Image (spheres, rainbow, N blue to C red):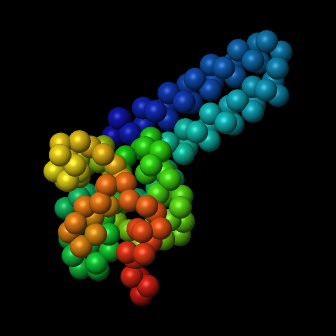
Amino acid sequence: MMRAWMLPMLLVFCGSAVATALVLGGSPGEAAVFLLVFGLLAGVNSSVVFPRSIGALEARRRSAIDGRPVVYWRPGCKYCLRLRVRLGRSTRQLHWVNIWRDPAGAAAVRAANEGDETVPTVVVAGRPHTNPDPAWVREQLSPTV
């Protein structure tokens, strides 16, 4: 769990350090902007912008029942963020597994990607697809969900 928050904490720390230096240098307005930008970057790279993650085993079980795709992702991944943003409200129709929190999810991704933890890996009907186009993922969602 700590691994998932390392990048956001580093961003907040760096932003705070730069903002402190700017305030001491007499630029409180710039400091506030820097702090806001680094805070937004930390939020975007955290688990906060993604739907609640579940375990890989639970995601597979739910997917078998409702047919929804499973997305394996990790915080800080720009491709995962791109997928999340481009799917918009449709993200709630997917089962999200954070591979940094779930060892079984990380193992599933390695098995699908020749030993690499390449994310996002989207599993549709039992077939993994590495870093698919968000439009294609949206097409895989059933209209009744």
Q: Residue at x 43, y 43 (%)?
A: 77
Choose between 69 and 131: the one closer to the eye. 131
Task: Quadrant for the N terminus, please.
Answer: top left
Q: Is residue 78 visible?
A: yes
Say which of 108 and 135 sits in front. 135
Q: Image quadrant of residue 5?
A: top left
Instruction: Tell me which residue sits at (70%, 22%) in the image.
Output: 19
12 lies above or below 18: below
In the image, residue 141 sits, relative to residue 116, either above or below, namely below
Q: Position of residue 64 (x, y in %)?
A: 21, 76
- Residue 101 visible here: no
Residue at image location 53% in from the left, 61% down from the top: 86
Which image quarter: residue 126?
bottom left
Give left or right: position of 64 versus 97. Answer: left
Taking the image as shown, residue 21 lies to the left or right of residue 87, namely right
Q: Above or below — where is 65 with respect to 34?
A: below
